[in-house]
Image (cartoon, helix red, strand yellow):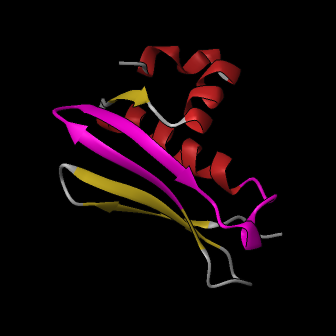
Amino acid sequence: MDDPAITLIDHGAEGEYQARVADSAAVGRLTWVRRDNVLTAEHALVPTEIGGRGIAGKLVEALIADAREQGWKIVPECTYVAAAFRRNPEWADLLA
């Protein structure tokens, strides 16, 4: 399987990461809201037709990479994102 194409949709105070795969029109999303330099990761949503491919993990990895690059902190409100932080203690410096 090819990696999903991840796109950041940034509307300033809110936005999302979107994941698309070549063989489906379905879109995985990780939504967030921003206040100053703190992003609250609200929801990771991956439709069942593209589930089981590690897409939610790729969405979180994109969030982490951008947070490091932009100097953002993250509040993992989404249970999936919170679990990813527990599995990756090296991300602890990004927690708000």
Residue 53 in the image: above or below residue 90: below
Q: Position of residue 13 (x, y in %)?
A: 18, 49
| Quadrant of the rendered image containing residue 94 | top left
- Where residue 8 sits: x, y (%)? 39, 60
Q: Is residue 35 magenta?
A: yes
Image location (x, y in percent) of residue 28: 58, 64
What residue lies at 51% left-to-right and 37% top-to-bottom? 78
The reply, left or right, for residue 57 in relation to residue 34 is right
Report the side of 88 relative to 6 (left or right).
right
On screen, residue 11 versus residue 67, left or right, reads left
Part of the protein shown in magenta: 29-54
Quarter of the image with the N terminus is bottom right
Position of 25 relative to 76 (above/below): below
Which picture quadrant has residue 61?
top right
Q: Quadrant of the C terminus?
A: top left
58 to 26, vertically: above or below = above
The count of marks equals 0
Residue located 55% across and 50% down the image: 44
Q: Is residue 5 magenta?
A: no
Above or below: residue 25 compared with residue 14: below
Residue in the image at 56% along x and 27% along y: 82
Q: Position of residue 16 (x, y in %)?
A: 39, 57
**Foreground pick, 4 / 79:** 79
